[in-house]
Amino acid sequence: MAPPIKLALIYGSAREGRFCDTVARWAAAQIESRPEFSLHTIDPAALDLARDGETLRRRIGQADAFVVVTPEYNHSFPAPLKALIDSAYHEWQAKPVGFVSYGGISGGLRAVEQLRLVFAELHAVGLRDTVSFANAHQQFGADGTPLDGQGATRAMATLLSRLAWWALALREAREARPYEGAAA
């Protein structure tokens, strides 16, 4: 049996009072229900990139896969998420990235489309399948669970199944032959 997939759940917002905590808690619970994953979180609100940069690069490097929980701010993703992403390079390479987005009418999908370009430049593999919460504040109950639990859970199950496949395939490939150009 393969060792668990080290999955890093990345918070995309660092705003005070952010809704990201609600969405990320739900995503974390979905991930923790799957035995193939070992969950770790990376939160830009808890980091000082100037001081914690090496630690962050190590945590990104140790991960086999990523789920980014991102809001959409002004048709894009938040600056703290971009700073976090840009703090590493080789550590992202040949690893899959899934997206859980939230926002207004678009559900954060415009942010995800831009993130796909950023991660492609880092040689990471962005997954097609996403989980998206349009008008997110109205999609979650007071207890932090989605009002349409079945739809969201099905979408997340698909995302996590495909993320697991890619994570294992790419981990095996990296072990067999280091990714060209990646730091050893």
Image (cartoon, rainbow, N blue to C red):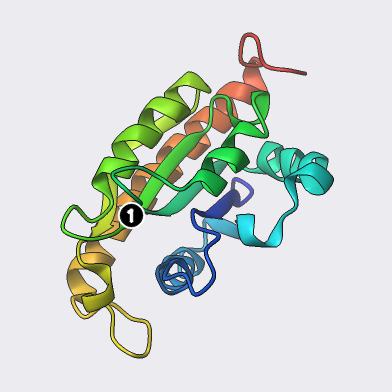
Q: Residue 13: horizontal and vertical position, in percent?
A: 50, 57
**Amino acid marked by disc 1:** Ser
Q: Residue furthest front?
A: 74
Q: Is residue 99 left or right of residue 175?
A: left
Q: Which residue is drawn at the image coordinates 28% and 48% (left, top)?
A: 130
Determine which quarter of the picture holds residue 56. top right
Q: Residue 109: horizontal and vertical position, in percent?
A: 25, 46
Q: Quadrant of the C terminus?
A: top right
Q: Residue 108: horizontal and vertical position, in percent?
A: 28, 51
Q: Which residue is drawn at the image coordinates 52% and 29% (left, top)?
A: 170
Q: Is residue 32 above or below residue 155?
A: below
Q: Is residue 42 visible?
A: no
Q: Is residue 53 above or below residue 35?
A: above
Within-10-Å neighbours for mark 1: few <14, some 14–19, many 20+: many
Read off the residue under disc 1. 101
Q: Tag 1's secondary structure?
A: strand
Q: Is residue 87 left or right of residue 161?
A: right
Q: Is residue 72 above or below residue 85?
A: below
Q: Which residue is drawn at the image coordinates 34% and 33% (left, top)?
A: 114
Q: Is residue 139 left or right of residue 12?
A: left
Q: Is residue 172 visible?
A: yes
Determine which quarter of the picture holds residue 146. bottom left
